[in-house]
Amino acid sequence: MCGIAGLLSLSTQPSAPDLVAALDQALAHRGPDDAGVWSERGTTLVHRRLAIQDLSPAGHQPMPSACGRYVLVFNGEIYNQRELRRQLERLGHRFHSSSDTEVLLELYARYGLSALQRLRGMYAFCLWDRQERRALLARDPYGIKPLYLHHGNGGELLFASELRALLATGRVPRRLDGQGLADFLNQGSLPHHRTLVEGITPLPPGHLGLWQEGRWQLQRHWQPSYAPDGVLEGPDLVSHTRAALGASVRAHLLSDVPVGLFLSGGLDSSAVLALAEQPLTTVSIGFAEAGFDESGRAAALARQFGATHHSVQLRVADAAATIPGFLQAIDQPSVDGFNTYGVSKLAAGLGLKVVLSGLGGDELFGGYPSFQRLPRAWRLHRRLAPLAPLAAAALGRSHRGGAQRLADGLRQPASIENSYRSLRGIFSPSEVGRLLRHWGLEPPLTHGHEPPQPCGPESWVVKDPSRFPTAADQIAWLESSLYMGQQLLIDSDGMAMAHALELRLPLVDAELLRALAGQPAAQRLAAHKRLLRQAVPEAEALVGRAPKQGFAFPFQCWFDADGFHPSAWGLPPLPPTPADLDVRAWARRWGLLVLSDWLKRHLGVELA
Amino acid sequence: MVDLIVPELHAHEGGVQIYSRTMIRGLLQVLPPSVHLRVFVRNDRPRHRPARLDPRVELHLLGSPLPGVPFLRFTAALLAAAGRQRPALVISTHPNLAPLQWLLGRLAGCPTWASAHGIDVWNLRPGPRRWALRRLTRLLPVSRYTKHQLQRQLKSPLGRRGPELVVLPNTYDDRSFCPGPRPAHLLERYGLDPDQPLIFCLTRLSSLDRYKHVDGLITAMPELLRSRPDLRLLIGGEGDDRARLQALVQERGLGAAVQLIGNIGADDLPDHYRLASLFALPSEKEGFGIVFLEAVGSGTPVLAGNRDGSVDPLADGAFGCLVDPRLPLAPPLQALLEGYGEPLWHQREALAAAVAERFGFRAFCGRLRRLLADVPALVGET
């Protein structure tokens, strides 16, 4: 887990020292253990290292291959590196370090682009082929590790692990992307292909890019499939699921430093703890607010599984005091992330460099209410089809946020994806239009009712339905690629890396998905995550049927409390909104506050 | 005496027919000279009798144009023959014949072996066939994948011991499928330059077989063409899915780069492998995939799926590139076209030699010989 950056250009001169220094400084918090730069003519690769595997200088990056043809900067972890290393050693390769970076280099040197299919892990990297003068940039299947791009003049490509690093170079104009702003207001996070800065785009998850002589070619190297495969039933399915989960957890424990776990007290993190088969340091946060505190259950779980447990009780004053650091840590804003920031801070304070999390269990095993609600909403929408415009008009008269989102959803054709977008997110498309106009900005859409057009990994649900045989499978992927992929994963990386902490997600793993996705949705996504409960009964026995929390913070209580004022929390004032716009829900207020701070801080833009 | 029961030998051309003829050749090679072979063919008729026949073979062609008659003739002939002389072993080249084979084995008191290829045993519903397969002496799946499918389905609920499962991999004609120069007549037929890169795929184009991911090859082409504008894709084979695939080609604007060429005659096939820069069939439900042996036997680099029996002919990746066929295919195809991978994949003569040694007819006979050593009656006859 590190920070990477670089410049690819047609120039024959090395990059300016100030550019290298700017990138290095901007990424320093991601890698306090080492720094490195490699340059050759117009190509510069920059690396900041957080040493997790092979703590010695042998893991220094940028790393050249044994043959000298390739140079790599790599951010992430290859969890099957030992297996790949053994395979390469059997073929005669001799390694000089125990780092996964060297394994990836030599794997590519042998297998080229097909090496990507052999990787189990989270990653973003740039591999420079000195012979072909070609760069390969790639990002893991789910997009756990970020990578941002800026295409400059003359075919130049600037890339970095963080958007702020690209801004720090001074080569990217600090201009607001209007469509990105609209997307954020609609979804509460940025889509996979856009940022808030014009000219900066993420490399989409599961994609690779080839840069050669100023030409850029983007293509997929991974895509999900839920089509039936080796279907199992009953006890066979349960034991298969347990084996697949156990394999993923074991793989994610690969480390040369101690590994911790964010233990919320819910089923997902408890299952990870139960399957870990080694003592872990567990970390949790508790609250005084009734209904949010799972710290007692987390402590009991930790005791049961022999973990060393640490917990803090977060009071409203503590939360307020944490806000300035949190706002400063945001690379890309979302309506979430504060919880990850808080628990990461605690873990880093304990000296941990690596922590596991149970994130992803709800997407994999059907834990969200959307798995029950969306099919009902979709069926109702189909039945109402002739009356939908009337219903939309009636609902549109209401000022309530939920009614507005439903109204806009009914104006779209009935589909699982449209139902998903109308039920998830913050502001409806028409509310977004009103907000933008209120701030004197032109809505980028031709009219105010259209949701964003799918372009990222979520669009596979529409483009290739054969991969999603049931509505539940579609919802599983929409939750994985949109809510988790756009929001939770971006927050996880940003907030953990702000504390030089590597966050690992054993339930967000392409190999695990491959093992389970071909099993029938009726069992895999059964209500209350039944399959996960059956597969890890020792966790189920302790967690029981407690309601889902997962480090949920009591924002609504805090924001609704008498005397709440953004400035007391170090937050900017709430931007002006139309008088009849419903901003009672905390997510709406929080989203506007975080957005407003980010735009002012990084682009000098005020929403007024 | 060994009895071999087969569905067809020469009436049509297909995988089971080739396998059955290879089994006859193999048995004649391996069995002691004193042992004769009685071959019972259900569908072939007298006009299908080959011009030359080994004197040790007693061939019974029992097909008939009248419905139901072949089965009756077949059964009667088998039982009558068993009455005349008991066989030491009954082998079937197809699992569908298992009930009859079981009966014959009971009457003759001899071991019963049946081959299992692929899709023929992936969905064994309760009934006489599954019942009989559980009671045969030995099943010969062609790959570990097919063996796994059999294990899963023949597991007895009562814990009864089932048949022994021994993998007997397919073989190929290593005299025909061998390396050679790109044939000029095919370069001309397809309008190719001598160095023009070409991906070749050969399979049945059935709407029931979309698991072969021929679509994936077509949809990978735009990305591959960006770095190799002269690349071509030839898809051989026929079936009811051809029109859909052709429409996909047109829809993607790939008419100039992708050609569906229909069935390829047996005589023309080896030259097509020699023409190809690489052979690709990214299927996820192959029982084995003899086409892979034919391709690597011709020295052509191969891309195949890693979820099924394809991994056996490619020796777990030693002979070719194994990929997840559900993932995008452009990156691994590009890697192969650029020459990445194991060195052996790109060394035509060395690859062909290694494949022939492992899967050639001589290797098949060696495996058959070891299997037959377990039959005391045959050992006694030697």
Image: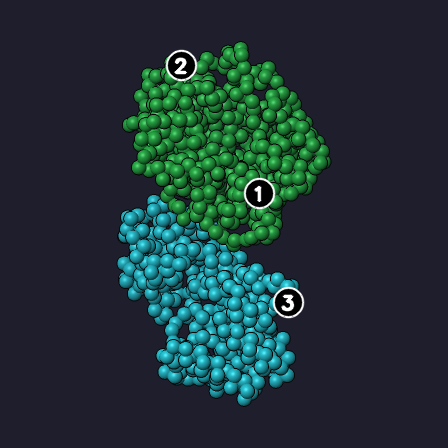
The x, y position of residue B59, in whole percent, is 46, 84
Query: Could you tell me which residue is drawn at 39 percent across and 84 percent down?
Result: B46
Q: Residue at x 68, y 34 (%)?
A: A301
SS class of the residue under badge 2? loop
The quarter holding residue B152 reads bottom right
Res. A156 in view: no
Q: CA distance from mark 1 to mark 3?
A: 34 Å
Q: CA distance from mark 2 to mark 1?
A: 45 Å
| Label annotation for residue A600 | none
How far across and how far down the image is residue A5, in percent? 47, 30
| Neighbours of disc 2 within 10 Å: few (<14), some (14-19), many (20+) | few
Q: Give amino acid for label 2.
A: Pro
Mark 3 nearby-residue class (10 Å; few <14, some 14–19, many ≥20): few
Label 3: chain? Answer: B
Q: Which residue was labeled with disc 3?
A: B161
User: Does residue B204 show up?
Assistant: yes
How far is disc 3 from disc 2 in space, using C-alphas? 77 Å
Q: Amino acid at mark 1?
A: Arg
On screen, A470 above or below A280?
below
Q: Residue sitting at 39 percent across and 45 percent down?
A: A464
Q: Quadrant of residue A97?
A: top right
Amino acid type shown at disc 3: Arg
Q: Report the residue marked by disc 1.
A: A530
Query: Which color was chain B given?
Result: cyan
